Amino acid sequence: MNKFIIQIDPMIGEKYINVPFVGQQLVEHPIYNKGSAYTEVEREQLGLYGIFPRYASTIKEQLRRVYENYSLKTTPIEKFIFLLGLLDRNETLFYRLVLEHTEEMLPIVYTPTVGEVAKTYSHRFRRPRGLYIPDDQISHIDRILANAPFSNINLIVVTDGERILGLGDQGVGGMAIPVGKISLYVVGAGIHPALCLPIILDVGTNNEELLKDPLYLGLKHKRLTGDRYDEVIEEFVKGVKRHFPHTLIQWEDFGKHHALSILNRYRERLCSFDDDIQGTGAVTVAALCSAIYSQHKKLKDQHYVFFGFGQAGYGIATLLVHAMLEEGLTVQAAKERIYPIGHNGLVFEDMNPHQYQMPFARKRAILQNWQIRRSDKVDLFDTVLNAKATVLIGTSGIPNAFTNEILSQMAKNAEKPVIFALSNPNNKCECLPENAFQATEGRCIMATGSPFPKVTINETTYNISQCNNMYIFPGLGLGAIISMTPKVTDQMLVVASKALAAMVPLNNATKGILLPDIHNIRKVSENVAFAVAKEARDSGLGIRLSDDKLRNLIKQAMWKPEYLPYRHET
């Protein structure tokens, strides 16, 4: 394996890349390919005569050309296929294009379009990207990891394809998610794509359609479970530690019965985090800080009802507890502010709750002074009513679960009730923003998981914030990499969350704008990365540099997609 290094000429201070090959082999490598933009000198020195038309383009001219072609595509999937083709040819040009059209292209590069790509992955397969690790070859993990394109990998995004977005088990098609997620790390935080590696752990699939599909590219057996599954994860982790000992691993879209156990098993052993749990928690707590602090109130004084309490609910609640600790509450007092609702209503300790729910399950003694309508369970309305909820958070995937009755009760409980309907995609949202504003007479503060347009009621326009994990994970990843921390702690997530919230002016938050503009994602990621690296340093886990040096190191590490001069020094 080659190392990817951007070098600086000590004589003239010029940045350059020493490429490992020349000629046709060079232009077929997407990391190194410049397309028609190789200079006259490079064409001579790198053996490129005759491979391209005579004129050497500038990157601006290339951008105009590819955007013109992109604009001719009429459907999201056509646009995705075009962008994927560009990524497979010329990564620098791809990332420059997406960076200059971030808001327009993010829904194409990632959600919601990537969900359709995952579903049809085996039928649209064109070129391998990343590494595929089937369970029947786990004994060859060293040989597999040796096929990584570069030896100095800093970031791995890995999935087993079991819980892909809201689509469930997509088997090997889940590879579309790590590939898409890495593109967001590059766009958002400037982590160089050569230092990133998407991986799929193919442990089978329980999706009958895939098992019967003759074109399906993954292993055609039921998913591994129990000890055999755990062995695959363990061998994967050991292999990564041997080959890339300082890399950050992001666990992505693992099933609910595996995600938390994997996170807890390995978070002390290697630098890793789960975006579905911790990233969701951090961005949501940031939005909560904006919503609550804009009212000159504190998190610790609110009553939180969670409707749906799996990975996302657990992640939000866990980080919320840490945030309330900083406001002076004990762990127990903070947990008593949280009311988790599961399939069978409010979760109690005697209900044999799931591992996510157990730390927040309530004692039945709280019912002594409650008035409830049903004897078999305490439903969402009764919980909102009796808990005097001021914050309602939905992660259930059940559309329209927040009824007018529930929303109206929230309006009785608080002057500005906080309504976060976070389930994706839009058709699984717990309530439409328009319904929330109507039921609360325009007084609620609203956030969703998917993007919604502003709502206008009686000539008044209301803002809806999107709790997009992209506000957190790129900066979190960059901060962890730069600081060289051996683990990602809960406190790092808290400071990341607060750094994000601090970027929202008070006058914006009072208008319901709870998060920064996505156009500023690079600055957001810089601030989040700095907060994480500083926390790593202060807790004794990260490199010991001054604030100024840490900030400069982060800025220098954020790659801007541009063509550097090439040399071939044998």
Image (spheres, rainbow, N blue to C red):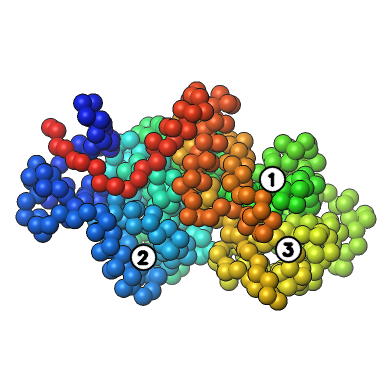
Q: In this view, does 134 lie to the left or right of 515?
A: left
Residue 10 sits above or below residue 48 on the image:
above
Q: Within 10 angstroms of label 1, few (less than 14), some, or many (20 or more) residues?
A: many
Q: Which of 254 and 403 is in front in this view?
A: 403
Q: Do the residues labelled 2 and 1 touch (CB within 8 Å)?
A: no
Residue 381 sits above or below residue 14 on the image:
below
Please tell me whether mark 3 sits on a helix, a strand or a loop.
loop
- Amino acid type shown at disc 3: Cys
Residue 220 sits above or below residue 299 on the image:
below
Q: Within 10 angstroms of label 2, few (less than 14), some, or many (20 or more) residues?
A: many
Q: Residue 192 carries which label?
A: none
Q: Is residue 173 left or right of residue 393?
A: left
- Which comes sooner in the sequence, label 2 or label 1? 2
- Amino acid type shown at disc 1: Leu
| Residue labelled with disc 2 | 80
Task: Evaluate whether residue 526 shows in this view.
Answer: yes
- Which comes sooner in the sequence, label 3 or label 1? 1
Query: Which image quarter is the C terminus in?
Result: top left
Q: Which of marks 3 and 1 is in front?
A: 3
Q: In this view, does 263 lie to the left or right of 159?
A: right
- Count of all numbered marks drawn on residues in the image: 3
Residue 405 sits above or below residue 473 on the image:
below
- Image coordinates of residue 391 in percent, x first then y, are 74, 56
Alpha carbons under labels 2 and 1: distance apart: 36 Å
- Image coordinates of residue 368 in percent, x first then y, are 93, 54
Q: Within 10 angstroms of label 3, few (less than 14), some, or many (20 or more) residues?
A: many
- Amino acid type shown at disc 2: Phe
Please tell me whether mark 1 sits on a helix, a strand or a loop.
helix
Q: Residue at x 31, y 56 (%)?
A: 94
Task: Evaluate whether residue 114 shows in this view.
Answer: no
Q: In this view, does 279 lie to the left or right of 336?
A: left
| Residue labelled with disc 1 | 320
